Structures are given as structure tokens and as C-alpha cells.
Image: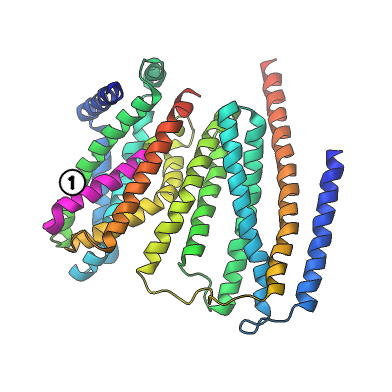
Amino acid sequence: MNFLRQSWIVAAKDLRAELRTKEALNASLSFALVILLLFSFAFDPTAEQTREISGGLLWIVFAFAGALILNRSFARELVNDCLDALVASPLSGAALFFGKCLANVVLLLAIELVCLPVFGVFYNVRWTRQFWPLLLVLALGTWALTVVGTMFSALTVNLRLRELMLPTLVYPLLIPALIAAIQLTTALVGGQPLAGDLLNWLKMLIGFDIIFTALALALVDTVLVG
Amino acid sequence: MRQKILYGLCLAAVLLLGRNLAVMLLELPDEAAQGAIYRIIFFHVPAAWTAFVGFFAALVASVIYLAGKNLRYDALAVAVTEVGLAFATVNLVTGMIWGRIIWGIWWTWDPRLTSMLVCWLLYAGYLMLRRAVEEPTQRAKVAAVFSIFAFADVPIVWFSIKWWRTQHPQPVVWGGGSMDPAMWRMLFLNWVPLLLLFGVLAALRMRQEQAQREMDALRRQAHAL
């Protein structure tokens, strides 16, 4: 209980700071929209083609936009040595990490929910036919992206090449989660119900989330404290 | 003394490799369907096994490092990862050469190939990550955590790509036939020199890494004075 309360305090702090400055949010959202636009020039797809590539297109946009948010997650605490203060506070490292994950998930989901209607309009796709299953897949995929990304944000926070290292390390690790999310999203945007083969992908996504959340929570104290 | 053991192991590896090559080329017949090129399997498959031995050793060394913070294990982890990555490269390249001749294509998104490629990317990322961190204990910590994450990812990558592929048309893979016992024996026999070579290279690399750290420490000391 205490753990969740502590995590929530960190998440609320991060969200408040972000909503007041909006620096990562604005950058990430406009970046996402630019990539969405670029894809339509790059492929100029017909409605049929768009349905086939929708999952891949959306998740590449989300993964790129996510990297911008995740990069900032721990780096913003470097100013005035805030990170040292957080580590020295009575919070456990796991609670600090979990709180940051929660805040990042909320921010990323917000960006995704803005991108989806834009995608629907630009590409002329009716994406709402399986709205709730799609939302579930978005949440699970975003959690995978966030938990691995936040962990590496903590890991690379003191590095010179932080902005470069994070995506190069995180994307290969995320391949299973991205494949699952892409398969599911393509099917759901196409109007297929969440059943049959798709359930296997859902299980894989959930499994990925559980394994990497557990691993990250187990290792984060070592990363932050040393 | 250690030096002599290493030389001895190296010599044993070379002799065994020479003997195996002679048997492969002179005694074993060409494979019925594939002709002469099948011999590449004697390096291709054991190289993959050796690479995974290396990655597993890196996982163990990383966990031991995080538990005890002894930099020896960090040196061990980087040594086995680097040599393991070299063997993974051998595996990928020999596989591509074989594929070009038997399938007519250099690459296909088959689960085995793709997983190995992802694995290769992950551990190449590990080496890149190490170069980005200057402070030795921080580098060791960051690298050890990444190594654990990478190893946990490999089985999931394997399953995900396998499922991904079963939903797409597949090229003909592996032919499912059984192999002659003499060829099986050679496969394992040739693993022995590759493992010996792996051990020697990893030991050398580990010593180099430790020497490097000592030199860095001395340089810092000189700066301080």
C-alpha cells in the first residue's frame, strides 16, 4: 500500500511538472505528428494498404515519440542535483521508478490518443470499430515501451551520449513487444475481434510486461544507488 | 604458468581443428542433396552454440558482479561477450553463405536467423554502451544490468519471431532430414576446438581488460599528482 502511495506521489509530481512546462509533451507530440505526415508522403498508401500497415506505422510513431519522453524522464532530475535528493529521500528506488513509469505511461497514452484520430483523418481509416480492445493493446504496449525505456533512462542518465544510447539499446530489446503490439493493432484497426490467434499475441505482450516489470523493479535499486 | 596453459590450449585447438578439417575434406563424403557446401555446418552450428555459451557466461558474470562488485567479473563479462559476439558473427556469415548457395538468397526472415540477428544487435549494443561510460564502476554496473536484460529478452524474441513467421509464407527451411551419425559426430567434435579457442580468446581479452583498467588507474593517479 505504502509502495503504491509513494509511487503515486512521484507520478503526480512528474505529471505536474510536465503539465506546467509541457516541454517533453510538446516536443514529443509534434514529433509524432511530423512522422505521421512523413509516412503518408513516403508510402502514399491506398485505404487497403493503410489497413495492412496501420499497426507498424502507428507503433513506429509511438516508439519514436516515446523515446523523447523517456529520455527526459530521469534527465530532468539532473538539474540542481534533484536525482540525488530523490535517491536520498525515504522513497525506495522501486517506488521512484514505478512512479516515473506511471507518469510516462499517462503522457505517452495521451499522445497516442491524440495521434489516433489524426491518423484516422489523414489516412482515411475508421479505427474505432474495436475501440476498447484497441485501448487495451495500446495500454499494454505502452507499458512495455515505458518500463524498459524508463529503466534505461535511469541507467543512461549520467552518460555523455544519453540521447543516442537510449533508443539504440531500447528498440532491439522491445522487438517482441513491438511485434505483438503491431500484429494486434493492425488486426483491431481492421475491425477483427480480439479472438483466436490474436489472443496468443495478447498473452505474449502481457508476458513481456510482467517479465520486464519484475526484472526492472528487482534491479532498479542497484542502478540508482549502486 | 598461466601463459603456458593458454599456449597449450591454443595448440590443442589448432591441432584438433587441423585434424577435423582433414577428416571433413578427405574422409566425409559430400552430402547427397547439398553437395560440398554442407561442410559449412561444422562451423556454423558449433559457432552458434559457442556464442550462446558466451552470452550465458556473460549473464552469470554480470549477476556475480552486481552481487559482489568485484571488477574481475566485469572484465570476465566483457571478455566473454566480445568473444561470443565474434562467434555469433561467424554463425551469421557462414549461414548467409550457405543460404546463398542452397536457397539462392543471402537472407530470409526465418526465426533462427532473425533471433540471432537481434541477439547480435543486443550484444553489439552492450559493447557500444560500455564505450559511452568512462567511470569504471559505473560502466560495470550499467553494462551488467544491460546484459541481464538482453539475456532475458532472447527467449522472448525467439518465440515472438516464430509466431510472427508462422503467420507468413515461409521459404523452405532446414529440410527436416536426419543427418548421418558420422556427420553428427563431426559436429560435436568440431565444437571442442571452437570452445577451446573461445576459452583462450576470452582469457586473453579478460587480462587485457584488467591491464587496461590498471593503466587507467595509474593515469588518473599521475593526473592527481
Boundaries of the magenta span:
A127-149
Q: Quadrant of the N terminus of chain A?
A: top left
Q: Majority secondary structure of the magenta segment? A: helix
Q: Is residue B63 left or right of residue A200?
A: right
Is any part of residue A37 visible from this angle? yes
Q: Quadrant of residue B169?
A: bottom left
Q: Position of residue B208 (x, y in %)?
A: 73, 38
Q: Is residue B19 left or right of residue A16?
A: right
Q: Residue at x 58, y 37 (%)?
A: B62
Q: Nearer the viewer, residue A62 or B109?
A: B109
B155 relative to B33, above or below: above
Q: Residue at x 44, y 54 (%)?
A: B157
Q: Is residue B13 left or right of residue B62?
A: right
Q: Quadrant of residue B45?
A: bottom right
B93 relative to B157, above or below: below
Task: Return the residue at label 1.
Answer: A113
Q: Nearer the viewer, residue A140 or A57?
A: A140
Q: Residue at x 29, y 44 (%)?
A: A142
